């Protein structure tokens, strides 16, 4: 079983998380009209529409990695910053990660394109408590860079709250008894187009707390 060695920001508490499930949520924007437009844009370049919105992709937890380098197949992959909800021993934590994806494969099978790539996660997390309540969610900011260039930037308030996603996820795939990791969706790209770079830097900035960050590079398999 995969073990993520995480640290709680502020306290330094170590968390050996062994997730039973890795769920990547897609199409999680609060603005449903914007989601519909995004689906149309993807369809125009050959990406099939999802059967449901939001969509929950049940992936292998072995894809998770806190390492500074991950291996990928081919050169047409790219990452994107995401808030990450983690449950460990009944307590919820918030972190930052990247839903790295094979963009060529995505045109044929979205689930397979996500399953084809590792899912980097930052080693530091913020403890939320026994429920995924984060009152300052609407003030949090997320961003990413690829090879030193700005790639994404904006408020996570544009995404559905993790508590809502958790409720919808449970209704879709059922209860998860043990630890799990839920990727909560991403922001629009600054340039509007995917970039296939080598070095990815992620940040999730929370009010009155140090930013959660992670940087990783990709290497061919």
Image (cartoon, grey):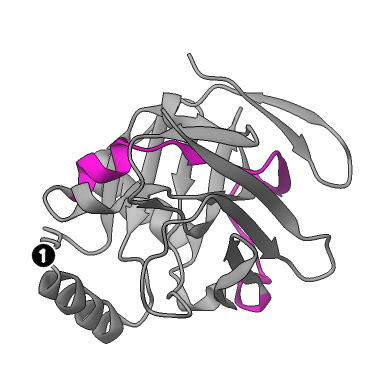
Q: Note whether 137 is above or below 217 in the view shown.
A: below
- The answer to whether residue 19 shows anywhere in this view is yes
Q: Is residue 28 magenta?
A: no
Q: Note whether 14 is above or below 10 in the view shown.
A: above
Say few, some or many: other residues with alpha carbon within 10 Å of mark 1 (under 14 / 14 to 19 / 20 or more): few
Give the residue furthest to the right: 11
Q: Position of residue 115 (x, y in %)?
A: 30, 36
In the picture of the structure, the residue carrying the numbered disc 1 is 46
Q: Position of residue 197 (x, y in %)?
A: 49, 55
Bounds of the magenta segment: 110-139
70 or 205: nearer the eye?
70
Q: Is residue 116 magenta?
A: yes
The residue shown at (10%, 65%) is 46
Location of the C terminus by quadrant is top left
In the figure, residue 208 lies in which quadrant?
bottom right
Q: Note whether 96 is above or below 33 in the view shown.
A: above
Q: Label 1: state its secondary structure.
A: loop
Q: Position of residue 21 (x, y in %)?
A: 40, 30
The residue shown at (32%, 51%) is 76
Q: Is residue 149 left or right of residue 79?
A: right
């Amino acid at each position: 079983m995969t073990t993520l060695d995480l640290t709680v920001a502020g306290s330094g508490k170590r968390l050996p998380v062994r997730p039973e499930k890795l769920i990547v949520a897609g199409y999680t924007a609060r603005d449903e009209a914007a989601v519909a437009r995004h689906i149309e844009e993807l369809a125009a370049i050959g990406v099939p529409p999802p059967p449901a919105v939001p969509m929950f992709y049940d992936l292998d937890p072995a894809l998770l990695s806190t390492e500074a380098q991950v291996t990928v197949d081919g050169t047409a992959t790219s990452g994107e910053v995401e808030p990450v909800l983690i449950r460990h021993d009944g307590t919820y934590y918030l972190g930052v990660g990247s839903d790295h994806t094979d963009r060529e494969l995505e045109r044929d099978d979205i689930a397979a394109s996500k399953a084809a790539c590792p899912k980097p996660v930052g080693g530091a997390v913020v403890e939320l408590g026994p429920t995924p309540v984060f009152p300052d969610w609407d003030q949090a900011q997320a961003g990413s860079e690829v090879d030193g260039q700005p790639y994404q930037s904006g408020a996570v308030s544009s995404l559905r709250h993790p508590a809502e996603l958790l409720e919808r996820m449970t209704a879709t795939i059922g209860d998860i008894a043990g630890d799990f990791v839920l990727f909560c969706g991403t922001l629009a790209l600054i340039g509007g187009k995917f970039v296939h770079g080598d070095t990815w830097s992620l940040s999730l900035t929370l009010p009155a707390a140090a930013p959660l960050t992670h940087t990783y590079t990709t290497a061919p398999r």
